[in-house]
Amino acid sequence: MNKKRPAEIGLSDTELAIRWQDGSESRYSLEALRRNCPCALCRALREEPGVQTPPPPGPLELPLLSKEAATATAQASGWELVGRYGLRITWADGHDHGIYTFESLREQG
Ligand SMILES: [Zn+2]
């Protein structure tokens, strides 16, 4: 169990950067974070590929419309801390249900 918390959080157009209290730094692609949104709605969509498929991983294979859609949903307009355990990201399309726990972020980073 790693219970380290962020000392500093930064958001760019494409990345979320976290400097942890132990001095290490992690960077996360916003597109990947959105694709793995932990909220119940997105999890349900991912488990039911017939309803709506998440953006495919390779940008080169994306048709134009899907690429635009993927870009719109992979831009973050802000974030806020949730209690002592996680981070909520508000996406450019208004979606803000997913809470990314520091524990899961540490595992990815
Ligand atoms: Zn979601």
Image (cartoon, rainbow, N blue to C red):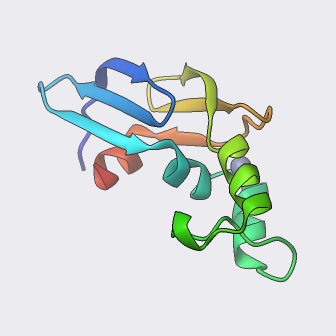
Give the left or right position of residue 39, taking residue 103 as reference.
Answer: right
Q: Position of residue 84 (x, y in %)?
A: 44, 24
Residue 57 visible in the shown view: no
Give the left or right position of residue 5, taking residue 33 as reference.
Answer: left
- Reply above or below: 95 against 11: below
- Reply above or below: 29 against 57: above
- Residue 22, quarter of picture: top left
Q: Position of residue 10 (x, y in %)?
A: 39, 20
Q: Nearer the viewer, residue 64 or 13?
A: 64
Q: Residue at x 73, y 50 (%)?
A: 68
Q: Residue at x 65, y 43 (%)?
A: 98
Q: Residue at x 79, y 36 (%)?
A: 93
Q: Position of residue 53 (x, y in %)?
A: 75, 72
- Reply above or below: 101 against 40: above
- Reply above or below: 48 against 31: below
Disc tally is 0
Q: Nearer the viewer, residue 39 or 92?
A: 92
Give the left or right position of residue 52, taking residue 24 as reference.
Answer: right
In the orientation shown, which residue stands out farthest toward the bottom?
50
Q: Residue at x 46, y 25 (%)?
A: 12
In the orientation shown, which residue stands out farthest toward the left?
23
Q: Nearer the viewer, residue 107 or 35?
A: 35
Residue 32 visible in the shown view: yes
